[in-house]
Amino acid sequence: MANIVYFDLETQKSAAEVGGWDKKRDMKMSVGVTYNTGDGQYRIFSEDQVADLVKQLTRADKVIGFNIVNFDYEVLHGYTPLDLHATPTLDLMVDLEQKLGHRVSLDAVAKSTLNAPKIADGLQALKWWKEGRLMEIAEYCCFDVKITKELHEYGKQFGEVSFVDRVGQKRTVKVKW
């Protein structure tokens, strides 16, 4: 069985606070979470454990996440000289965007496919960071990793996922995950 690592992170700062989306490295990680199929364990990483997080990601047979190629990896590049883009990766958002021609949110796909809405969002996680509420960030991040894992497994099993489009219509998209 392949060692798949599902992954998500939250940041300490917003794009506005660091001077724009082109400065993701400066946003700094608040909390990172993985689920490793090799041992069936969730792991929570604080900023001072980022080297351990990078090690787990680079040793995975495949890393799976939602918007990790253009966001999470870019944040982590502020901590490591390693090119995380060289890691075998399936970014569910990138795959869906290529098929649909536009981006969809994890919340839109999770609600429609799994009837599992997200429990918070990145702006809430930033607020929690400023308030020192790391456990709330970790819980939220764990939940996003779990949703991503279940969404991937659903798409792999059924060959499709669904989402609600901008006009409120439920749409289905074929996937080969």
Image (cartoon, rainbow, N blue to C red):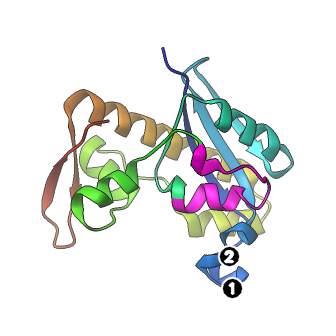
Residue under numbered circle 1 = 19
Q: Residue furthest top?
A: 1
> Do labels 1 and 2 touch, CB within 8 Å?
yes
Disc 2 element: helix
Residue 62 position within the rendered picture, expressed as x and y whole percent measured from the top left: 52, 33
Which image quarter is the C terminus in?
top left
Q: Is residue 39 left or right of residue 81?
A: left
Disc 1 element: loop
User: Which residue sits at x=71%, y=58%?
Assistant: 77
Q: Residues within 10 Å of mark 1 (few under 14, many from 20)?
A: few
Q: Nearer the viewer, residue 10 or 93?
A: 93
Q: Residues within 10 Å of mark 2 (few under 14, many from 20)?
A: some
Residue 17 position within the rendered picture, expressed as x and y whole percent measured from the top left: 71, 82
- Rounded to the nearest angstrom, the CA distance separating label 1 from label 2 is 7 Å
For residue 139, above or below residue 15: above
Residue under numbered circle 2 = 23
Which quadrant of the structure image shows residue 164? Answer: bottom left
Q: Amino acid at mark 2?
A: Lys
For residue 14, above or below residue 66: below
What is the magenta range?
Answer: 70-86
Q: Is residue 10 left or right of residue 131?
A: left
